[in-house]
Amino acid sequence: MFLLTVLTFSQTSINISNKSQTENYKNNTHYIEIIQANNYLNNILGLDFVSKNLKFDTIITDRHLVAIYETTNTKNLDGKNTILVWFKFHNLRYEIDSINTVLDKKEIIKNIKGKKCNLFIGLKKAKEIAEKAGLESGIKNWNIYLTYQNNFPIWVIQSTYGESKEGAYRASGQLVKINMIDGSFDKNDWDAIE
């Protein structure tokens, strides 16, 4: 059985468990969500464990609201160092995502010890995969977001190679979809007309 390390947030109250954890995020637009994600992890894994072994990386807001955490292990060569906390907002309440999700301290400990584990491929590794796939920088910064495809979490890294604002807006480029579990990817062209 494959262990997924996706967390879906289902709490709405804010309880600042560790003030030092929160000071760094006050200027972030999603400060409250970061606090909620920290509290969620603290409740599941324990404040001491989270403080020593996980660090908040970023919030992705395109398509889904996802808080991304990385383990403190810097020796992980396969790039699997990421835990996700997904937020799904509906009728003013956070709800549980449809995917069956599990988080286990053992997997994080394996990662920290440099052993093979069931964490997800992080953003740094995903960018390396996109570059190796031949995705060029384009005329704008890459658009990066998370989604699901066939019940697997996917990094999508999109590059814009051209755009025109004369008449209807038109843009084109390429994107790479990267499976966060095994690193497999697909590279495709994209076009948009608005």
Image (tube, helix red, strand yellow):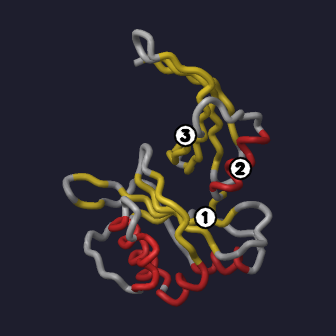
Instruction: Kindly identify the amino acid type of the residue bearing the numbered disc 1.
Output: Thr
Q: For the residues marked 2 and 1, what is the alpha-carbon distance in whole angstroms? A: 13 Å
Query: What element does badge 2 sit on?
Result: loop
Q: Position of residue 168 (x, y in %)?
A: 40, 12
Amino acid type shown at disc 2: Gly
- Between residue 53 and residue 119, name the one nearer to us: 53
Q: Is residue 1 visible?
A: no
Instruction: Bin the neighbour count of mark 2 within 10 Å (Cα to Cα): few under 14, some 14-19, many 20 and up.
Output: some
Alpha-carbon span between mark 1 and mark 3: 19 Å
Residue 183, numbered label: 2
**Identity of the residue furthest to the bottom in this view:** 48
Residue 143 shows which numbered tag?
A: 3
Return the disc, 1 or 3, that comes first in the chain's sequence.
1
- At horizontal 61% and vertical 81% (from top left) the residue drawn is 53
Q: Earlier in the sequence, mark 2 or mark 3?
A: 3
Foreground residue among 133 and 162: 162
Residue 117 location, quadrant: bottom right
Secondary structure under tag 1 reads: strand
| Quarter of the view holding residue 63 | top left
**Where the N terminus falls, by quadrant?**
bottom right
Mark 2 vs 1, N-terminal side: 1
Residue located beneath label 1 in the image: 82
Q: Is residue 100 left or right of residue 139?
A: left
- Quarter containing the C terminus: top left
- Res 175 → quadrant: top right
Nearest to the eye among marks 2 and 3: give it.
3
Question: What percent of the width, then of the height, locates residue 130?
Answer: 71, 42
Query: Residue 50 in the image: x percent, y percent?
Result: 53, 82
Q: Is residue 176 left or right of residue 98?
A: right
